[in-house]
C-alpha cells in the first residue's frame, strides 16, 4: 500500500545486515557503527511514522468491528510498541551499544517493533477466551480490509479461512449480518463443515459457489 514505506524498510534491512556483520567481528569498529547508525536513522524514522499512522488508523476500525461481532461488552485496543518512542535511532543504538557488543547483533531498533492487542486494558492473549481472541482476529482482518479499500478505492478480495471455528452462534450471526449489510465485494470462505457453511452463506446471498477439495483437487458442487 505504501511504496515509500517499502523502500524505507528495505533500505533499513540492508544497513541492519551490515551492522550485524560488523558486530560479529572479534573487535567491532565503533566508528563504522556510528556511521551506519546515522545512515539508518532516516529510513527508521520513515518506518516508525508509517507504523504509527497504521496503528492510529486501525484502532477505531478494529474496535467498531469487534463490537459488531461480539455484540459489545469488551473494549479492545491496539498499542504500537517501538524503541523509537524512547528517542532517535542513533540515541537508542548508543544506549544499547554494550549490549550489542555482548550479544554480537543489534538488539534494539525498529526490527523489534510490535503491536500489543488488549481487551479491557489487558493483553488479549492472556485475558481473552478463545472466542474473544478469534473475534478480535476477525475484527483485525476486517479492519485491514477496510483500510485497503479506502486506500485503493475499490473492494479487494477477502479470504476468511476457517473463520467460524471457536465462535459461538451469536458471534457467527453477528458476523454474517455484518458481511451481508456492507459491500465487501468477492469473498472466499473456507470451513471444514459443509452443512454449516452452506447454511450460513445461503442466508447472505444467492450469488455463490461451493467447492470441495481433496488432495489438492477442487470440485465444484
Image (cartoon, rainbow, N blue to C red):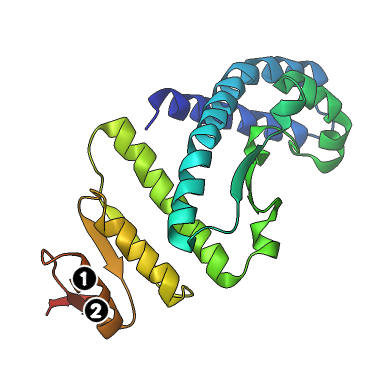
Question: Residue 59 has which mark?
Answer: none
Alpha carbon separation for disc pair 1 and 2:
7 Å
* x, y percent for residue 64: 46, 47
- When the figure is inspected, residue 172 is found, relative to residue 144, above or below; the finding is below
Which residue is denoted by mark 1 in the rendering? 203
Relative depth, front residue between 138 and 111: 138
User: For this rendering, which residue is in front, 3 or 184?
Assistant: 184
Query: Disc number at residue 199?
Result: 2
Name the quadrant containing residue 173: bottom left
In this view of the protein, can residue 148 be seen by the observer? yes
Residue 213, position in %: x, y?
A: 23, 78
Q: Position of residue 212 (x, y in %)?
A: 21, 79
Is 171 placed left or right of 40 in the picture? Answer: left
Query: Splitting the image into 4 quarters, where does residue 169 fall?
Result: bottom left
Locate the C terminus and report the quarter of the image it occupies.
bottom left
Percent across and percent down for residue 41 are: 65, 18
SS at badge 2: helix
Question: Which one is nearer the viewer's eye here, 38 or 187?
Answer: 187
Does residue 162 appear in this view?
A: no
Amino acid at each position: 500500500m505504501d511504496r515509500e514505506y517499502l523502500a524505507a524498510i528495505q533500505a533499513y534491512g540492508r544497513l541492519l545486515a551490515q551492522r550485524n556483520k560488523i558486530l560479529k567481528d572479534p573487535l567491532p569498529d565503533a566508528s563504522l557503527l556510528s556511521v551506519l547508525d546515522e545512515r539508518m536513522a532516516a529510513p527508521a524514522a520513515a518506518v516508525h511514522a508509517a507504523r504509527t499512522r497504521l496503528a492510529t488508523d486501525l484502532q477505531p476500525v478494529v474496535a467498531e468491528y469487534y463490537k459488531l461481532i461480539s455484540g459489545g461488552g469488551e473494549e479492545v485496543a491496539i498499542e504500537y510498541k517501538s524503541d523509537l518512542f524512547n528517542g532517535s535511532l542513533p540515541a537508542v543504538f548508543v544506549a544499547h551499544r554494550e549490549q550489542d557488543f555482548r550479544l554480537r547483533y543489534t538488539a534494539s531498533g525498529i526490527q523489534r517493533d510490535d503491536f500489543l492487542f488488549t481487551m479491557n486494558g489487558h493483553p488479549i492473549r492472556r485475558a481473552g477466551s478463545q472466542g474473544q481472541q478469534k473475534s478480535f482476529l476477525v475484527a483485525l482482518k476486517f479492519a485491514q480490509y477496510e483500510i485497503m479499500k479506502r486506500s485503493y478505492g475499490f473492494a479487494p478480495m477477502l479470504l476468511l479461512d476457517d473463520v467460524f471455528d471457536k465462535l459461538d452462534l451469536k458471534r457467527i450471526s453477528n458476523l454474517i449480518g455484518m458481511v451481508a449489510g456492507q459491500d465487501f465485494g468477492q469473498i472466499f470462505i473456507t470451513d471444514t463443515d459443509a452443512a454449516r457453511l452452506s447454511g450460513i452463506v445461503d442466508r447472505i446471498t444467492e450469488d455463490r459457489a461451493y467447492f470441495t477439495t481433496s488432495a489438492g483437487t477442487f470440485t465444484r458442487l
